[in-house]
Image (cartoon, rainbow, N blue to C red):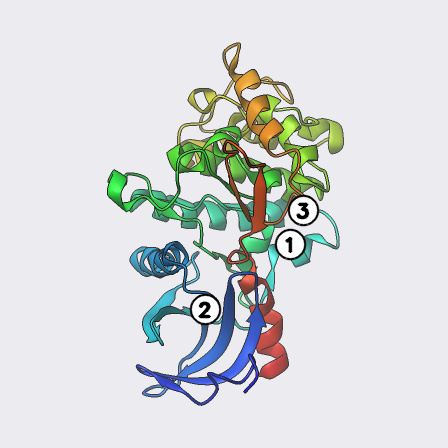
Amino acid sequence: MSQGEWLVDRRLGEWTVEAFLAEGGMSTVWRVKNARDGTPGAMKVPLGRDPDLLARAAREGRIQAAIQHPNMVRCLDIVDVDGRPGVVLELVEGGETLDTRLRAGALPPDEAERIFLGVLDGIEAAHARGYIHRDIKPSNVLLGADGVPRVADFGLGRPVYEPPAEKLTRQGYILGSAAYMAPEQARDAGSVDAQADLWSLGCLLYELLSGVPAFPGERVDEVLAAVSQGRYRPLDAVLPGVDGRFVVAVDACLAVDPRARVGDVATLRRILSRQQRWASGGGRAHGPAGIASREEAAADRARRAPVPSNATFVSEPPRAGRGFSTASLGIAGVLVLLGALWLALG
């Protein structure tokens, strides 16, 4: 039986597998239907049996189940699939990813702001429940036929505070997408807090309004050097005449030093509504002297990484006697296909 057939017609808990949808680097996605009430779903199943991978997949489901917010893709269930966690997520009908929408160019400012505020609401709900996403980017935002933005894929998500014994990200590992990854996340993804998500939100707002990434480049090694020093073209240089509040909001998010960054989602929302002022530098390195050099060291570790800068990846720190290695994580972005596939299979 082929990879695309081995689960079809299986009954897993309350769910019947109807069709194979997609395969990423680390998981497969299956269309399922609830045998009790007919609710459709998309079930993600890890490809391998590596204990860390299985633990991360199960944690992804638990996080999304705990948040349950209109601007988050909902987790409907977690079932056992031959000893692996099958995370059943809602199917966003008639949907597309924000990444797909942006291929046609920048969004009108009012539409960009509407979508961005929806993403803010979802991320704020996650933060309020003690979780961070660590991979906010256009391909992880789904737009349904109802126009509501939903944040997808908590494959890299984790609790802000974790007992050392429960940590899945080892010290010195890099996880994320270089074009949207905070400098401190490029140094050690396991030590970041909600401030890393604020950086990613700044990158998202920049791209929604301008149609181009704040940190462009095809490869990780081309991007992290700029990220490490906060070198980006100011939004008003890329988009002359843009409302100044958007410029301030982006700059407040893209401070290299997380201590100089906007403190939380609520403050960012107040900046956008002109209820709070913020002093910003605009397209220059921020933070105390010396921090850029530390981030440059992290970028140097990634210079041999042949990974697209918008792809989610995991990389190990260099060890004695071996070089730097990277691999596409593949968990983030599997949902990219679900909206189109739902239409095609519907």
Is 65 above or below relative to 224?
Answer: below
3D distance between C-alphas at marks 3 and 1: 15 Å
SS assignment at label 2: strand
3D distance between C-alphas at marks 3 and 2: 23 Å
SS assignment at label 3: loop
Nearer the observer: mark 2 or 1; the answer is: 2
Which residue is drawn at the image coordinates 58% and 62% (left, top)? 336
- Which residue is situated farthest in the front direction here? 321
> Can the viewer see residue 316 in this picture?
yes
Quick one: label 3 or label 1, which is nearer the N terminus? 1
Residue, disc 3: 308
Q: Is residue 243 left or right of residue 41?
A: right
Label 1 Cα neighbours within 10 Å, binned few <14 / some 14-19 / many ≥20: some
Instruction: Say which quarter of the image contains residue 269.
Output: top left
Label 3 Cα neighbours within 10 Å, binned few <14 / some 14-19 / many ≥20: some
Using the image, tell me which numbered label, if any, was put on residue 44. Answer: 2
In depth, the one of 151 and 180 nearer the eye is: 180
3D distance between C-alphas at marks 2 and 1: 21 Å
Q: Identity of the amino acid at label 2?
A: Lys
Label 2 Cα neighbours within 10 Å, binned few <14 / some 14-19 / many ≥20: many
> Can the viewer see residue 240 in this picture?
no
Is 330 above or below relative to 263?
Answer: below
* Dot 3 and dot 1 residues touching (CB under 8 Å): no
Which residue is drawn at the image coordinates 29% and 57% (left, top)? 66
Q: Which percent across, then down, holds residue 135?
A: 50, 46
Q: Identity of the amino acid at label 3?
A: Pro
Using the image, tell me which numbered label, if any, was put on residue 117. Answer: none
Is 170 above or below relative to 31?
Answer: above
Residue, disc 1: 99
